Amino acid sequence: MAATHFSGPVALGSGSIEIISADKILSAKEDNGKTLILKAATGFNVRLPKHEAGLQFKFLIGSNFITDNWVVTVPASGVATMQGNIQDGAGTSINVSDADQISFLATNEDVGDFIEMISDGIAWYVHGQVLANNAVSIP
């Protein structure tokens, strides 16, 4: 059997994990591919970078929060809209259409709720899973 040879670095797995407990502006260069665990007693704001093809992020609720929502928003400049859907525990699809933010709602979230976002350079495509039907809000 022939041996396999690689030139350059080999990435095992994808991205890394970061715990967020305060407001954060994501960087395309430094944060792309990360799983961001939202873990604080209160919610904060997380702003996506300007959309670029290939950017992707996963937001995961890491602890229950009782005040303020965790809000994921598109940047003010170079706005791309969010498209997709989030499934709740009852199997209901929560439609995300031309949205500029998604909020995980305080006291309605469950540890393990998540959304994933991928950009093609034109829009942010969203899918996710939450337990409660009122765990997220799409304005």
Image: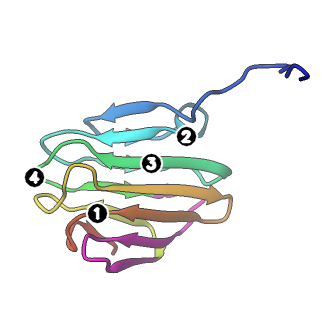
Tell which of 124 and 50 is nearer to you.
Answer: 124
Residues at marks 1 and 2 touching, judged by CB atoms closer than 8 Å: no
The residue nearer to you, when weighing 58 against 137, is 58
Q: What stretch is highlighted in magenta?
A: 74-96
Residue highlighted by disc 4: 67
Q: Earlier in the sequence, mark 1 or mark 2?
A: 2
Secondary structure under the numbered disc 3 in the rendered image = strand
Q: Which mark is residue 130?
A: 1
Q: Distance between the residues labelled 1 and 4?
A: 18 Å
Disc 2 target residue? 33
In this view of the protein, which residue sits in the foreground, 72 or 129? 129
- Mark 4: give few (<14), some (14-19) or many (20+) Cα within 10 Å: some
Amino acid type indicated by mark 1: Val
Task: Say which label, 1 or 4, has the lower sequence index.
Answer: 4
Q: Position of residue 113 (x, y in %)?
A: 29, 55
Q: In whole angstroms, how far apart are the C-alphas of marks 3 and 1?
A: 13 Å
Q: Mark 4: which amino acid?
A: Thr
Q: Where is residue 55 in the image (x, y as percent from the top left)?
A: 61, 48
How packed mark 1 is, by other alpha carbons closer than 10 Å (few <14, some 14-19, many 20 or more), is many
For disc 3, the neighbor class at 10 Å (few under 14, some 14 to 19, many from 20) is many
C-alpha separation, residue under disc 3 versus residue under disc 4: 22 Å
- Most distant residue in the right direction: 2
The reply to whether residue 68 is in sight is yes
Q: Mark 3 points at which residue?
A: 58
Please tell me which residue is depicted at 27% across the width and 50% down the height of the picture. Answer: 112
Residue at x-position 10% and y-position 52%: 67
Camera-nearest label, 1 or 2: 1
